Amino acid sequence: MRIDSFAYLPRSFRPLYELAPSGDEPVWAPFEPRLAEATIALLSSAGLYVKGEQPPFDLDRERAEPTWGDPTHRVIPDGTAPSALGMCHLHVNNTDVLADPEIALPVQRLSELVADGIVGSSAPTHISVMGYQQAGLEGWREHTAPAIVERLRDERVDGVVLAPV
C-alpha cells in the first residue's frame, strides 16, 4: 500500500513542498569519495550549543513569536564532552536529549565508524541549528545555510549526516 505523506503535512509546510523538483531532475548530488576516505560532519536541528562558550539560541523571541525560529547556527567542536552541551528548543524535550546527546548529535557513533575504518574521518566541527524554522526560511536560506556550507567547504567536509530531532 502506498501512503501519501504529503497529505499529512501541516498546512503551513505545504507551500515548501509544492515547489519541490518535479522528479525529472535528480535531487541528490553524487557522493564521489569512498566513505572510508571521506570526512563527515554532523548537522543537528536540536538547538545545541557549548555552555559557557556560546550564546544559547533565542528562546525569548520564539516564545513571543511562536512561528519564529532562531535562524543562527552554532559550531560544535568535535570531541566536545556531552556534559558541555546545552540545548534550546521549545518543540523538543530537552531533558531527553541532554540525558543522551547522541540522540541529536551522534559524535561518539561517528568516532566508532572512523575507528572501524568505515568512515575516513570526523570533521573538526559539527553544526547545530534550531529546528522549526517556519516563518524565517528566507533568511535561513540566504544567510544561515550559505554560512554553514562555506564552513563545511573550508573544512574540506565531503558529506554531512543530518540528525533531525
Image (cartoon, helix red, strand yellow):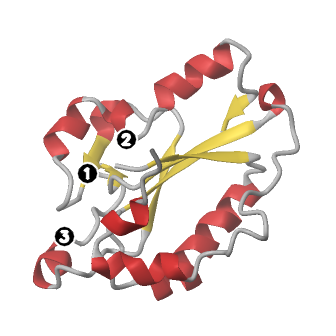
CB-based contact (under 8 Å), mark 1 and mark 2: yes
Q: Residues within 10 Å of mark 1 (few under 14, many from 20)?
A: many
The residue lying at 83 percent from left, 30 percent from top is: 37
Q: CA distance from mark 1 to mark 2?
A: 10 Å
* Nearest to N terminus: mark 1 or mark 2: 1
Q: Quadrant of residue 124?
A: top right
Amino acid type of the residue that numbered disc 1 sits on in the rendered structure: Met
The residue lying at 78 percent from left, 63 percent from top is: 26
**Position in image of residue 163 (x %, y %):** 46, 45
Which numbered disc covers residue 104? 2
Helix, strand or loop for disc 1 = strand
Q: Quadrant of residue 40?
A: top right
CB-based contact (under 8 Å), mark 2 and mark 3: no
CB-based contact (under 8 Å), mark 3 and mark 1: no
Q: Residue furthest top?
A: 116
In this rendering, the answer to whether 77 lies above or below 21 is above
Mark yes or no: residue 124 visible.
Answer: no
**Position in image of residue 116 (x %, y %):** 67, 12
Residue 36 relative to residue 53: left or right: right
In this rendering, the answer to whether 125 lies above or below 69 is above
Which numbered disc covers residue 59? 3
Helix, strand or loop for disc 3 = helix
Mark in front: 1 vs 2: 2
* Nearest to N terminus: mark 3 or mark 1: 3
Q: Nearer the viewer, residue 70 or 26?
A: 26
**Position in image of residue 67 (x %, y %):** 23, 81
Q: Residues within 10 Å of mark 2 (few under 14, many from 20)?
A: many
